Image: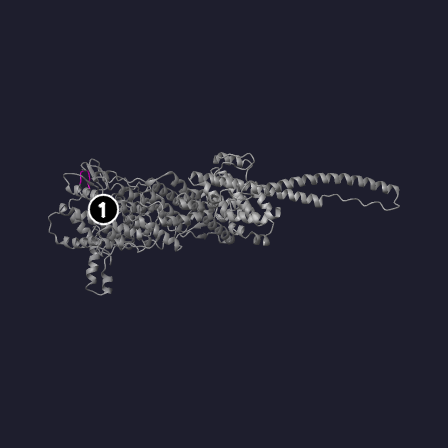
Amino acid sequence: MLHGQQSRWPRQLFDAEDAADENSHHHYWQGGAATATANAADETATFGNIISQDTMAIFKGRGLVNNPLANSSLASISFTNNNSAVLQQQSMAPTVTAATAAVHEIQDEAQLAAGENLFADFHQVIGEYDGLELCRRLADLCSDQDALLRRLGLRLGSQQRRAIGWECQTWRLLALLYRDRMTANNSAEDAMGDRDAEVDDGIDEPMVEDADQSDSDGGYHWSQRHPEKHLVAHLYATDAEVREFQLLIDWLEAAAAARLDELPSPPDACEAAAAGGVPWEHTLHLLRRSAASVPAGLVNRLDPDGPIAAAAQRKQFSLQHQQQEQQQHSLQLADLDRAAEDRLLAAGFQLLRAGQLQRAGRLFSSAGQHWRAACLYGWQLPSNGNPYGNPRRDLWRAAAWSASSDCCLSRWERAIFAALCGSLDPLLAVFPPAAWEDRLWAHARCFVEARVSDCLGAATTTGSTCPELTGPAAAAASVAKRLTSRETVMGRLECRELWPSVQTALILDRPGTLPAMLAGRLADGELDSQELRFAVHLALCLQRLGLLGPDEPNSVKLLHSFIDGLIEEGRTDLVAYYTARLPRDEQVGWYGKLLQRIEDTSARVHCLQLAERAGLDTAAITVSVVESVRRADLDTADCGANSNAALAGASEQLTEADRRKINALDWVILAGATPRIEAVRQACALARLFLALNKEQGARDALAKVPDDSLKLVEAQEGGGSDGGGVPGSLPPVASDAMRELAGLKAYLAAQEAVADWTVHFYQARPERPEPAPAGAPYTEKLFYEQRERRYQAELERWRHLLSLHTRAAMSRLEDLLLWPAPGWLADQFTDQSEAAEPGRTAQLQSLRRLYLPQLC
C-alpha cells in the first residue's frame, strides 16, 4: 500500500533559481520571441569572450599573440550569432582577414581535438563502471564536452553541439528508462518508492513522497479526503506506460531547461523587461490620454477579457462585412503591447516546455497578468498543503480545451492551454515537423493527461450538465483514441535520423533492434567516427545490462569497424580493451593487426602489457603476428615445395620486407607468456624460408634471434631433458623435433661457414712464391731473393697449418651433418605430430634435404 505517500504528476523539476545545465543538444524550436525580434541587431561578443584560453595558447604558438599588429587586428574582431567575423576597422582589412582565417582554423582544430578526447575518456569510464552508473558517467562526459564546445564559442545550433547534445540525452534516456524497467518486477510500492530517475544533474526526484510534505508544484497526495489522489497514485503504480511517458516528459523538460539561456530570445530577457510592469501599459497610456474618445482601432476595455472580446468582435464582424470594413472597425491593443504580449506568451511557453511552471507563473505575475498565472494551476487536483488544487478540474479542463482551439487567442497562449489540458493539435502547431523532441514532448503530455483524466473519470465529476463540456469531452476522447499505447504514439513520430531512431527503439523497449540498425547505417556510410564510438559503447552497455548477447553479430561488426578505425588513427592504447570484447576466436587476428604496425621495441612491450591487462592471449597473438608477417609476400609451403624454382630467380640480398620478417621474431621473444619453443619454431620456419631463397645471411639473422639459453628454458618449460649432445632427449614430440631442427639448421650454417672459410683460405689466402733472381743478377739482388724465399716458406708453412685446421673443422662439420642422429639431418622423429602442428613442414624439410645434402657430399 502507498498510505502516507504522494505521486507527482507532472513534476516540475526546476525553480527560477535553478541553474541551467550546459550539456544539452540543439533546441529546434526557437520560440515566438525569435520572430518578434528577427530584425533586431545580433548580439556580438568580443574575441576574448569567445575564444577560450586553450585556443589562445594555440594563437601564441602561431605567433598571433604578443604581436602588436596581430593584437590590434584581433581586438577589432567581433562575432555575430552566425560565428562570422565582423570587421570593425576597415583600415586594417588585410590584417584582420588573415587573423579571422586563423581564428576559424584554430577553432576547427580545437573542436577536433576536444572531440578526439572522447575516445580515451569513454575507454577509461567503460573500464571502471558498469550498469546504469556507466550510462550516467558517459552522459557526464558528453555534458563536459558540450560545455567545452560552448566555451570555444560554438553556438547551440552548430553541428558539433547538436551531435554531442543528442548523444548526452540518449545516454540519460537509457539510464532513465531501464532503471524504471528493472524495478518493474517488484511490488507497486517498491516500484513507486525506488523510482530515482536520472535527469539533468543525474538524480531525479522520487515519484512518490510523504503525504506530510507540501507540494508547491501541485503533486497528487494520498489522502482519504481526496480520493482522486488514490486513483492517480494507483495509476502510476500499475501502468508502466504512464510511468514511462512521465519519465519522458521529465527528461525532455530537463533538456529544454538546460538550454533556455542559449535560445535567441531567452526567457530571462523577457523576465527582466516584464518585472514590475503594468499590463498593456502603452494601450493604457493612449486610453488615458484620450479619455474623451477612444482612438480608432484601439480596444476600449483593459480587463483580462478585453483583447479577447475585441478579437471575438473582429471575428464576428468579418463574417458579415467585407475585408476593408473589417480592417476599419477592428479593435486591437497598441502595436508595442501586441509585440510585448507575443514575447511574453512565447517566453511563458518556453518555460512550460522546460517544466518550469512556477517560473512561468512568476513571469506572468511580474508582468501584471495574474489571471494568466492562475490559469497555469487549474489542472492540479486539491490536496492537503496544496493551495492551488482545483476541485473543479473537469470544468477547468473543458474551458482550457476550448481556449486551446480559440483562434482569437495567440498561438502561444493556445499552446500553453493545450499543453496543460492535453489538446494535441494546437500544441503541435507551434513546433516545426523537424522538431522531433518537441513533438515527442507534446505527444507524451497529451498521452499522460488522457490517461489521468480517464482514470479520474467519475471521481472528478462535478454533477454539472453544462453543455460547454460536451464538445471538449468529445475532442479529448478523440485524442485519447489516437494515443492508445506507446506503439501508436511512437508510430506518429517516425523519423529516419540516427538519434531519434535510437531513442525510439529505447522508448519502445526494443534494444535488440539497435545493433542491426546501426550496422546497416555503418554499411551505408552514414556513421562518422564519433557516431561509431557511440554505437559501439551503446552495444557494450546493452550487453552489460543483459539486453544483448555477448557475441551478437551486428555488435561484432560495429566493433570490427571501430577497432579498425582506432588502429588507422593510431590510438594504440585503446585497441586492447575493445579487442577483448570480440569473440575469442577473433581476438588474435584483430590485435595482431595492430602489432604488425609496431616497430619500436618499447612500444611493443607496452602493447603486450596492455594486451595482458585486457585478458588477451598474448602467446597466440604474437605467434599469429610472426606468421602473418612471414607469409606477407609468399607462402612458405609453396616456397619449400618449389625451392629450386625459387633459387633460380632469388636474390641473395636481404630486402626491407626480409628485415621486417626477422624483426617480427622479437614478438615471441618479448612476450613473457609465449613459450620459448614458439620462438624456436618461428625462427626455424623463417630460416627454412631464407634457405629456400638462397639467403643464408637471412637464415643466420633469424636463428640469431633465438637466445642462447633456449635449450635449457625449453627443457624447463616443456619438462624434458637432454641426451648430453645438444639434442633434446625426452621433450614432447613437437618440441623435440623443433629443437632438432634448430640444432640441424645451426649445424648446417656452421658447416657452410666452415667450408666458406676453407675455400677462402685455400684459394685466396695462399701466399705467392717470389720471382727468382735472374741469371747474372747482382749479389744484393740475390740476397733479397733469398730473404723473400725464406719468408715465403714460413708463410706457406703457416698457411698449410691453418689449411689443415680449416679442413679438419669443415670435415668435422660436414661429418656431423652426414652422420646426424637418426632419422637424419632435417628429418623429424615425430613426423605426424609435427606436421599436424605446422602444416607443410615435412615438405619443406624434404625439399631442403634434396637441395643441400648433395652439395655436402
How busy is the neighbourhood of tag 1: few (under 14 within 10 Å), some, or many (20 plus)? many
State the residue in front, 719 or 214. Answer: 719
State the residue in front, 406 or 764. Answer: 764
Q: Return the x and y of residue 11 as percentages of the image width and height.
A: 25, 43
Asked if one can make out residue 850 in the rendered structure from this viewpoint, the answer is: yes
State the residue in front, 738 or 265. Answer: 738
Q: Who's the residue at 73% across and 43% down the image?
A: 766
Q: Return the x and y of residue 502 as percentages of the image width and height.
A: 33, 50
Q: Is 778 within the magenta?
A: no
Q: How many marks do you count on the picture?
A: 1
Region of the chain picked out in magenta, as a range: 383-387
Asked if one can make out residue 14 in the rendered structure from this viewpoint, the answer is: no
Assign the N terminus to one quadrant of the image: top left
Q: Is 384 within the magenta?
A: yes
State the residue in front, 538 or 275. Answer: 538
Left or right of residue 230, residue 617 in this image: right
Q: Return the x and y of residue 410 as percentages of the image width and height.
A: 25, 54
Quadrant in which residue 662 is drawn: top right
Residue under label 1: 242
Secondary structure at numbered mark 1:
helix
Q: Who's the residue at 81% across and 45% down the image?
A: 771
Q: Return the x and y of residue 715 as percentages of the image width and height.
A: 50, 35
In the image, farthest residue toward the bottom: 322
- The kind of residue tagged 1 is Val
Q: Who's the residue at 45% across and 48% down the image?
A: 107
76 is higher (above) or lower (below) than 674: below
Q: Who's the residue at 20% across and 57% down the image?
A: 312
